Amino acid sequence: MSASMQASDIVERPPPPAHGWSRQRILGYGLVALWAVMGIGLVAYLVSAWNSELFQKYAPGYISGVGITLSLVGISIVVGAILSVPIAYGRMSRNPIIAGLAYAYVYFFRGTPLLAQAFLVYYGFGSFRPELDAIGLWWFFREAFNCAVFAFALNTAAYQAEILRGAIESVPRGQWEGAASLGLHKMQTLRKIILPQALIVALRPYGNEVILMIKGSAIVAIITVYDLMGITRLTYSRTFDFQSYLWAAIIYLLIVETLRHAVDWIERRITRHLKR
Amino acid sequence: MQSVWTLLSWGSEGWLDDIAYGAFVTVSLALATLPLGLLIGFLIALAKQSSERSLRLAGDIYTTIFRGLPELLTLFLVFFGAQIGIQQAVRLFNPEATVEVNSFISGMIALGVVFSSYASEVFLSAFRAIPHGQYEGGFAVGLSKAQTMRLVVLPQLIRIALPGLANLWLILLKDTSLVSAIGLTDILRQAGVAARVTKHAFLFFGVAALIYLALAIVSSVGISAIERWVGKQEAHR
């Protein structure tokens, strides 16, 4: 302390703002250059490894794989959205039994890996083949794709229920009370007052959930569904050509980035009235 | 037909010991990944909150790539990519050599990279929650930049980032199940082996799911203990 007291007659000024080539700037340019080199290297590798025969043989597979990935996610998200409504209702219910059941459902599906759930459905339900045969549902669970949709829909229903609940609870209580004092009944309030406000809050989590599902859907390759990842593994096992994985990475990145920007765009559109 | 309890017993008849070993592998993989992911994530967050544009750009590219790729694909890219890369490097010296990449290390790298890209966002928002006056205050009492970071910013940062990081830990614990696809004997793979041998698939995958659930519950208890402890630290000051 005393040393600094003696030095205090020299006014200590804040450091001048960095200009020229600071250490940070050198590091930053170096890292960006590294990314650029890796990007150019990737393109150069893909160009040099270009094999039109291979491309003609496997490109249709990739396109159908993208189709299967998208339809798997699309169906699961829609079914999950329908299922999530009663679950979210249960989570907000005052009845402890209903609330407890809904909580247990959500806890199970959010606490265990999606891969374990898919295995449980695809391999596990095979243990109940006689019973499933008896009630005429075996045809459904025989197909790996259906099993994947089943597991994914249940899984995303749990997440979407939490999103829905959070969004509805984010709307202040006064909105309910105000609507009640205007003589709207509960359903009308929910539909006309609460949901329009809640869905603005929910949009971003919903977008994230779709993105998580698209990324998560890659695991169906392990239970023999030929989605984008499944086709990629098949191609790699036949050709031992590493570019099969690189192409899959590029396609997944394109899908996810497109979705992310679409969500950003929608959010900008629907919150225009909130901007000043 | 063996009874369920024989199948789930410890020893040569049952499978409990194998599944317990799988649980050990899962937990050690997650614990090994955590520091790696936290360290990389913190560095990326530092880059992303820097005033230097190129550093921010480099950090953003990193997160965009590794948050956009499916975790399974990242795992395969690391596993097969490293295999091919190291193979070719070794072939330069010894053309006969074949290389087998360790699936534990590959899993650690892939999951660590994914974890870090999410963790960097958590750290970044925590950085933004710390007022600029804290840095100025640190400078005013004569602390160097590194000291300000270590003594002033970091303790607050950890407190703010803790809930987000706890969430990421639970996700990491679940994501470790993916390494069963590259042959690591984790819970899910051991359950799969048991299911194939005994034909009790639902039983064993159900047990595997319950073990993951138990790990999640134990983690939540641990996390809330840590949160209480960190909260107490704050109250004492």
Image (cartoon, helix red, strand yellow):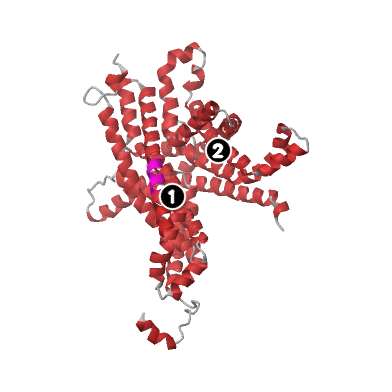
Asked if residue B210 can be seen in this view, the reply is yes
Q: Looking at the image, which residue sits at the far bottom?
A: A9
> How far apart in space, not on screen, are marks 1 and 2 (Cα)?
19 Å
- Assess whether residue A86 is covered by the magenta stretch: no
> What segment carries the magenta color?
B219-227
Q: Looking at the image, which residue sits at the far front?
A: B236
Q: Residue at x 43, y 21 (%)?
A: A125
Tag 1: residue type? Leu
Chain where mark 2 sits: A
Q: Residue at x 48, y 13 (%)?
A: A133
x, y percent for residue B59: 47, 60
Quadrant of image for the N terminus of chain A? bottom left
- Assess whether residue B221 is covered by the magenta stretch: yes
Asked if residue B185 can be seen in this view, the reply is no
> Compared with residue B30, is residue A110 higher up or lower down, i.e. above or below?
above
x, y percent for residue B101: 29, 46
Q: Nearer the viewer, residue A111 or A229?
A: A111
> What is the number of the mark on residue A174?
none
Q: Residues within 10 Å of mark 1 (few under 14, many from 20)?
A: many
Tag 2: residue type? Glu
> Compared with residue A171, is residue A156 higher up or lower down, i.e. above or below?
above
> What is the number of the mark on residue A162?
2
